[in-house]
Image (cartoon, rainbow, N blue to C red):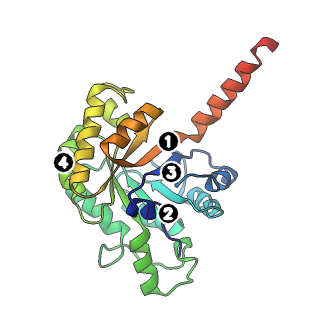
C-alpha cells in the first residue's frame, strides 16, 4: 500500500509543498506527479469534478510519488470515503467551525479504532484488494492525513479546540473565504487576514499539529513559514498556464 510522502515530510520536520490542479486531463496530473512536488490538490468543492473524474486523476498521479489531496464540500462525509478509496491520501475539509464537526470528519475518514469509516478494501487505496483487511485498515489510518480548514470568524474563535481533536493532522487557514466573510474579498495579505493566520498558526502549533495555508508570492510564503507553516499550497495550474502564455505573447508584441 502506498506510503504517504507528506506524512514522512512532516515526521522529519520539513515543509510539504503542493499545488492546485484544476485540469481534468490526466496527462497534466501525470506530468506534475513526476516533478519535485509533494502533493497535488484537487478541489471538488468549487469545481465540476465528479468522483469518477477524480478517480482517473488519482490513478494518473501514481506514475510519480506525490500524495493526492482532495477537498469535498462541507458535510460530504460519505463522499470523503469514496475519495479515499479512489486514492486520496489527504482530505481537506472546508469550513470546519467546531471541534464537534472536526470529530465527525475523523469519524468518517478513519477506520476503527480511530473512526467509523466504511470498509470496502477493493479500491485503488488497497491496490484493488491486494492486502488483508487488518493490514489495509491499519495502513490506511497511518497514511491518511486529515486537514481541517479555518475559513470564517466563527472557526477562528474555535481554532484551538479544533486543533486539539485527535485525528486532525493539520489545520489550514483559508485566506480567500476568510477575507470575503469579513468584508474584504481578495485582501489575502491584508493586516486582518494575516493576523487571523497568525492566530491559527499559534493555536495549531500549541496543539502539536501542522499549520498550513495558501501562499501567493515568495514573501508571503516566507511569512507563513516563519509562523511555523509546514504545509504550503503554491500556485495553480490554470494561473501558471495563463501567466506563461501572457509572457509568451508579450514577447511577440512587436509582431502586431
Can you identify the residue that label 3 sits on? 41
Q: Are marks 4 and 2 in contact (CB under 8 Å)?
A: no
Q: How crowded is mark 4: few (under 14 residues within 10 Å), some or many (20 or more)?
A: some
Can you identify the residue that label 2 sits on? 5
Please report the residue visible at 46 percent of the width from the left and 60 percent of the height from the top. 6
Q: How crowded is mark 1: few (under 14 residues within 10 Å), some or many (20 or more)?
A: some
Q: What element carries label 3?
A: strand
Q: Is residue 52 above or below residue 160?
A: below
**Figure quadrant of residue 62:** bottom right
The one of 184 and 222 positioned closer to us in this rendering? 222
Q: Are marks 4 and 3 in contact (CB under 8 Å)?
A: no
Distance, label 4 to label 2, CA atoms, is 29 Å
Can you identify the residue that label 1 sits on? 234
Sequence-first disc among 2 and 1: 2
Q: Is residue 143 left or right of residue 42?
A: left
Q: How crowded is mark 2: few (under 14 residues within 10 Å), some or many (20 or more)?
A: some
The one of 184 and 214 positioned closer to us in this rendering? 214
Work out whether residue 46 can be spotted. Answer: no
Q: Do the residues labelled 3 and 2 touch (CB within 8 Å)?
A: no
Distance, label 1 to label 3, CA atoms, is 10 Å
Distance, label 4 to label 3, CA atoms, is 25 Å
Q: Is mark 1 on a helix, strand or loop?
A: strand
Res. 158 mark: 4
Work out whether residue 19 can be spotted. Answer: yes
Q: Where is residue 250 in the image (x, y as percent from the top left)?
A: 70, 19
Sequence-first disc among 4 and 3: 3
Amino acid at each position: 500500500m502506498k506510503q504517504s510522502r507528506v506524512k514522512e515530510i512532516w515526521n522529519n520536520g520539513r515543509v510539504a509543498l503542493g499545488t492546485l490542479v484544476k485540469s481534468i486531463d490526466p496527462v497534466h496530473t501525470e506530468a506534475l506527479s513526476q516533478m519535485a512536488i509533494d502533493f497535488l490538490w484537487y478541489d471538488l468543492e468549487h469545481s465540476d469534478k465528479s468522483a469518477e473524474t477524480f478517480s482517473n486523476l488519482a490513478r494518473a498521479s501514481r506514475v510519480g510519488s506525490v500524495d493526492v489531496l482532495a477537498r469535498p464540500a462541507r458535510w460530504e462525509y460519505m463522499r470523503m470515503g469514496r475519495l479515499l478509496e479512489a486514492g486520496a491520501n489527504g482530505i481537506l475539509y472546508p469550513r470546519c467551525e467546531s471541534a464537534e464537526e472536526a470529530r465527525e470528519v475523523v469519524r468518517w475518514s478513519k477506520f476503527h479504532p480511530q473512526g467509523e469509516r466504511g470498509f470496502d478494501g477493493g479500491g485503488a487505496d488497497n491496490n484493488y484488494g491486494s492486502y488483508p483487511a487488518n493490514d489495509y485498515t491499519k495502513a490506511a489510518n497511518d497514511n491518511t492525513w486529515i486537514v481541517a480548514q479555518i475559513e470564517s470568524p466563527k472557526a477562528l474563535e474555535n481554532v484551538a479546540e479544533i486543533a486539539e481533536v485527535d485525528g486532525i493532522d493539520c489545520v489550514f487557514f483559508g485566506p480567500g473565504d476568510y477575507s470575503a466573510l469579513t468584508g474584504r474579498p481578495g485582501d489575502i495579505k491584508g493586516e486582518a487576514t494575516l493576523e487571523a493566520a497568525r492566530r491559527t498558526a499559534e493555536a495549531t502549533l500549541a496543539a502539536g499539529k501542522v499549520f498550513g495555508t495558501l501562499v501567493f508570492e515568495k514573501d508571503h510564503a516566507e511569512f507563513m513559514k516563519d509562523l511555523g507553516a509546514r504545509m504550503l499550497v503554491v500556485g495553480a495550474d490554470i494561473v501558471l498556464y495563463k501567466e506563461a502564455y501572457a509572457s509568451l505573447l508579450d514577447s511577440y508584441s512587436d509582431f502586431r
